[in-house]
């Protein structure tokens, strides 16, 4: 049997008639809210969920349903870490394939790849699985018709998502699903949710007739979900989806633990939810149980501290003798604008540092470009660095490889390097060479950590506060958020910003700071990737 024999069925029908889970046929009976998610024809979907609400199982079933229905269909699954991807592949995807009789008999071919990162079915459909939280390099070159980005709250949006979406550039389907559990109000998943239709599972109260949905602990009664108006108990089986932001093209679905009928109908399961209400912090409960964003990320440095770095001088081109008096070395950094069609803000920023006699980093000049097109900006960027007589420049290689090449042509290859952020598992060094010797690989977290410490200890000099307003805001847009590293459950802090709040000035500063360290020979390099 091939995909052409099952095209008359919907995804939900395929999942429930073909797939088995934990020794039983898969069923949506206890997950009535998932039917619409299976059947939506929206090209872009975001599921914002609490924990343990069948998010991963739904992702696996959607991957397989499309792969069964359409011969030679290509799917890409991405999570932040290899451990998360391996767990999904082994405990969700592979188990459904090999423990579902119809799948095992009709779609498993022992001569085809069947491993953690690649599954190929007998009808030619491919399922690639990868991972990236800030460095999408291992994903480049994969071709996909559907993509599922899991635990998206822990993925650096502007570094990873545009690259992942490009994997569907030639697809006739181009189906994208994001899923994850909320964290702060500035997180990637909150950005996606605000862009979506923001569908809530609404339930009509049989007592007063009002409609309710769950996004507050006030909805939790002693024995189940209660109406916010009259305290009558509600039945989640009788709910329906309602779009709070209906004009959006991206479908958004909010799923909380109390929405699961089994959690309401089983007193023991409901008691567990109430125990979490007592034992979790308010933020943990909102995130993990209610699936609601809460709080803001932690700032390492305050606006007041940044303002103390400002000195009353004015920056402009050409540089005046007073500005460069006593400067030992002049370097530059450039963060190139990334291509974005989904509202995320990105600009090109060129930054020029001068090293003072007492080894502080003095701002000699900077410029923020608003075109959001690196190639259009490169001529002026080259003029700035030439006018400032920069000895060495480092440019962002993530979105700017072509622009860096043009910049090298204009300034000379010996004066321009390029850096690509990374920082995944096993990358503990601050900076190293890639195998091809074409760019620096930079541990994103370590680099930002180090530069923030430079700011904190007042090793940086900014110009007057009026001219520094935009760069200071870019620095303040960056926040720290804790996440699981995927290695033994350990916790790491990573730097993020809301896609609505740009941080390009910060990265231009960091690349310039790295350029100065390279010129001074202060960095230890590894000969190749490890």
Image: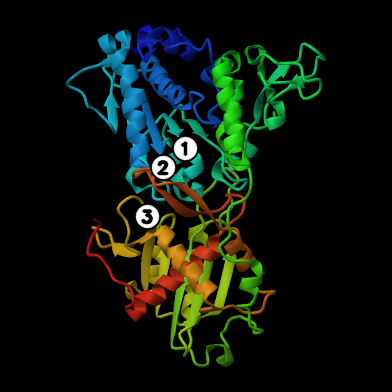
Task: Identify the mark at residue 151; answer none if there is no mark.
Answer: 1
- In this picture, is 293 found above or below 246? below
Name of the residue lying farthest toward the left: 111
Residue at image position (49%, 78%) is 353
- Is residue 324 found left or right of 137 in the rendered image? right
Determine which quarter of the picture holds residue 193: top right
Tell me which residue sits at (35%, 80%) in the image: 520
What secondary structure is found at the residue carrying circle 2? loop
How far from the left and from the top, in percent, is residue 56?
44, 27
Dot 3: what SS? loop
**Distance Cα–Cα, label 3 vs label 1:** 18 Å
Relative to residue 266, is residue 18 drawn left or right? left
CB under 8 Å between discs 2 and 1: yes
Residue with the mark numbered 3: 423
- Packing grade of label 1 (10 A; few <14, some 14-19, many >=20) is many
Marks 3 and 2, how far apart in space? 12 Å
For marks 2 and 1 on the same chain, the one whose residue lies earlier in the sequence = 2
Q: Position of residue 287 (x, y in %)?
A: 58, 37
Q: Residues within 10 Å of mark 2 (few under 14, many from 20)?
A: many
Q: Quadrant of residue 523?
A: bottom left
Q: Are marks 3 and 1 in contact (CB under 8 Å)?
A: no
Report the residue at 26% width, 17% height from top: 122
Dividing the image into 4 quarters, which one contains the C terminus?
A: bottom left
Q: CA separation, marks 2 and 1?
A: 7 Å
């Amino acid at each position: 049997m091939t995909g052409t024999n099952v095209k008359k069925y919907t995804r939900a029908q395929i999942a429930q008639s073909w797939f088995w889970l934990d020794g039983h046929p898969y069923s949506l009976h206890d997950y009535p809210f998932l039917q619409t998610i299976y059947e939506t024809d929206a090209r872009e979907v975001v599921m914002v969920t609490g924990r343990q609400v069948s998010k991963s199982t739904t992702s696996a079933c959607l991957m397989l349903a499309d792969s069964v229905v359409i011969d030679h269909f290509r799917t890409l699954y991405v999570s932040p870490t290899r451990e998360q991807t391996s767990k999904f592949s082994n405990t969700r995807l592979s188990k459904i394939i090999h423990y579902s009789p119809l799948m095992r008999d009709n779609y498993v071919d022992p001569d085809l790849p069947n491993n953690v990162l690649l599954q190929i079915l007998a009808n030619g459909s491919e399922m690639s699985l990868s991972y990236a939280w800030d460095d999408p390099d291992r994903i480049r070159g994969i071709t996909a018709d559907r993509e599922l980005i899991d635990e998206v709250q822990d993925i650096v949006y502007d570094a990873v998502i545009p690259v992942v979406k490009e994997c569907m550039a030639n697809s006739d389907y181009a189906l994208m699903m994001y899923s994850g559990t909320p964290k702060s109000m500035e997180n990637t998943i909150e950005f996606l949710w605000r862009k979506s239709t923001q569908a809530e599972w609404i339930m009509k109260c049989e007592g007063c007739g009002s409609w309710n949905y769950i996004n507050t602990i006030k909805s939790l009664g002693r024995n189940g979900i209660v109406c916010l108006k009259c305290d009558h108990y509600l039945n989640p089986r009788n709910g329906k989806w309602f779009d709070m932001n209906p004009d959006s093209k991206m479908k958004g679905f909010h799923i909380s633990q109390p929405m699961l009928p089994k959690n309401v109908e089983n007193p023991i399961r409901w008691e567990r939810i109430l125990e979490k209400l007592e034992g979790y912090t308010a933020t943990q409960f909102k995130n993990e149980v209610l699936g609601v964003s809460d709080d803001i990320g932690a700032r390492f440095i305050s606006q007041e501290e940044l303002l103390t770095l400002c000195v009353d001088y004015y920056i402009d081109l050409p540089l005046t003798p007073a500005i460069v008096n006593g400067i030992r070395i002049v370097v530059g950094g450039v963060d190139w604008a990334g291509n974005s069609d989904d509202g995320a803000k990105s600009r090109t920023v060129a930054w020029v540092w001068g090293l003072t006699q007492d080894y502080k980093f003095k701002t000699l000049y900077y410029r923020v470009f608003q075109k959001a097109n690196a190639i259009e900006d490169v001529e002026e960027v080259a003029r700035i660095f030439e006018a400032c007589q920069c000895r060495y420049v480092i440019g962002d290689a993530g979105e700017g490889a072509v622009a860096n090449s043009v910049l090298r042509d204009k300034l000379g290859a010996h004066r321009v390097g390029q850096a690509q952020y990374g920082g995944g598992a096993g990358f503990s060094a601050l900076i190293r060479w890639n195998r091809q010797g074409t760019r620096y690989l930079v541990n994103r977290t370590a680099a930002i950590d180090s530069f923030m410490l430079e700011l904190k200890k007042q090793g940086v000099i900014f110009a007057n506060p009026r001219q520094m307003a935009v760069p200071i805001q870019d620095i303040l847009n960056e926040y720290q958020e804790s996440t699981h590293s995927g290695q033994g459950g350990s916790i790491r802090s990573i730097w993020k910003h809301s896609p609505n709040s740009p941080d390009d000035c910060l990265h231009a500063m960091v690349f310039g700071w790295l350029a100065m360290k390279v010129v001074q020979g202060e960095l230890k390099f590894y000969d190749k990737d490890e």
